[in-house]
Amino acid sequence: MSTEWETKFPLAIVDALSREISDHTPLLLSTGEDCHRARQTLFKFELGWLLRDEFFDLVSDVWNKEKKGPTPLQIWQNKIRKLRQFLKGWSKNVNGTYKKKKTNAS
C-alpha cells in the first residue's frame, strides 16, 4: 500500500490468509467499499478426490471435451473453467450421496 492508495481507500484492510500448502502467505485486500456483484463460492480442491477410482478419468474426459477459444491461452482458460464447474457439481453430488449413506447407516 502507498500513501496515495490509503488516501483513495481510507477504509482499506489487508488480511493475511492461512498458508495451507505453499510457503507464501496470501493476502486479502479489501477496499472497505461494498461490492455490488454477487459473490461466487470459492473453488476448493479436495485432496480426497485423488483417492477416488473414477476421478482421473472424469477429469480427463472434461478436459478433453473443451476445445473452444481463438488462442491457446483462452482454450486453456475455458478448460479450467469447465473443469472447475464440473468438479463443483460432482463434489456436491458425491457429498450428498455420502451424507445419505451415513444417515441411512445410523
Image (tube, grey):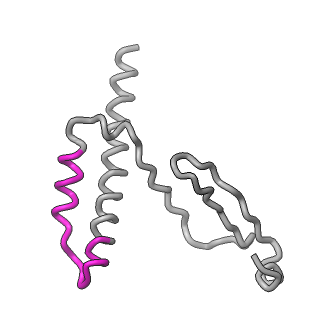
Residue 54, quarter of picture: top left
Tally the numbered discs.
Answer: 0
Q: Main secondary structure of the magenta part?
A: helix
Name the residue located 81 percent from the left edge and 78 percent from the top edge: 6
Compared across the picture, whether 50 is left or right of 26 comes to left
Compared across the picture, whether 18 is left or right of 15 comes to left
Q: Nearer the viewer, residue 55 or 18?
A: 18
Quadrant containing the N terminus is: bottom right
Magenta segment:
56-76
Quadrant containing the C terminus is: top left
Residue 65 among those drawn in magenta: yes
Residue 99, quarter of picture: top left
Name the residue located 33 percent from the left edge and 23 percent from the top edge: 101
Instruction: Point out residue 3 in the picture as x, y percentages from the top left corner.
Output: 82, 82
Compared across the picture, whether 71 is left or right of 81 comes to left
Picture layout, residue 18 above or below residue 67: above
Residue found at the very far front of the displayed protein: 23
Picture layout, residue 40 above or below residue 67: above
Instruction: Point out residue 9 in the picture as x, y percentages from the top left corner.
Output: 78, 78
Q: Nearer the viewer, residue 59 or 94?
A: 59
Picture layout, residue 105 above or below residue 14: above
Picture layout, residue 58 above or below residue 33: above
